[in-house]
Image (cartoon, rainbow, N blue to C red):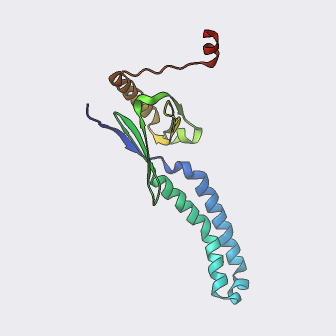
Amino acid sequence: MEEKAVWSGSSSQLINFGVYFVSFLIFAAAAAALLLLWPKLEPLGPVALGAAFAVALAPLAYAFYRWLDVRCLRYEITSERIRVSSGILSKRTNALELYRVKDYTLEAPFLYRLFRLGNIRLQTSDRSNPEMLLRAIPGARKLADEIRLHVEKRRDLKRVREVDFDEANDADLN
C-alpha cells in the first residue's frame, strides 16, 4: 500500500495572540518613553539614541521571532505516519507511526472555537514521544476523525492491537 497525504498544514498564528498583544503594549510604552526622554537623550549622542531605539524595538523583534517560529512549524499527516517539522534555521522532524496512536483528545479553548480551531492531543505507545500535540489546527474535529480512521486502517494492516496492563490487575494475577 502506498503512503498517501491526508492533510498538511500548520498552527494558526492565533496561538501567539498574547505575545503579540503584550509586545505591542511594551513597544507602545517604550516608544512613549522614548518620545518623552528624547530631549535628554539627544545631547548624549548617537550611541544613546541607538540603544534607546534598540530597547524600543526589542518587543517587536520578539513578536517577529514568535511569528516566524509558528510559520516554520509544519504538520504532515499521511496514511501511515504523522510528521512534525519545526525550526527556523535548523529543522527538526519528528515522525510518529499511526499504529502507535493509543488515544486522542480534542481540545477547543474558547478563543480557538471563535476561529474554528482546536488542539489535537495524541497519546501514543512511542517511548520517545508518548504525547504529541497538534496546536491551533483549523478543522480539528474533522482532522481528528480522519486520523482515527487511518489509525484503525494501519493497525488492521499491520495486525497490531494495543493492550494496556494495569499494575493493580497485574498484582492480582500473581
Which residue is depicted at the point 47% across and 46% down?
A: 11
Along the line of sight, the residue nearer the viewer: 35 or 106 = 106
Q: Residue furthest left?
A: 1
Position in image of residue 73 (x %, y %): 46, 50
Position in image of residue 15 (x %, y %): 55, 48
Q: Residue furthest front?
A: 174
Position in image of residue 8 (x %, y %): 37, 43
Along the line of sight, the residue nearer the viewer: 106 or 76 = 76
Which residue is depicted at the point 53% across and 36% down?
A: 131
Which residue is depicted at the point 60% across and 18% down?
A: 166
The number of numbered discs placed on residues in the rendered structure image is: 0
Quadrant of the snapshot with the N terminus: top left
Q: Residue furthest top?
A: 173
Q: Is residue 86 left or right of residue 172?
A: left
The correct choice, above or below, for 100 with respect to 70 in the image is above
The correct choice, above or below, for 155 with respect to 25 in the image is above
Along the line of sight, the residue nearer the viewer: 41 or 61 = 61
Quadrant of the snapshot with the C terminus: top right
Position in image of residue 139 (x %, y %): 44, 37
Which residue is depicted at the point 64% across and 78% down?
A: 51
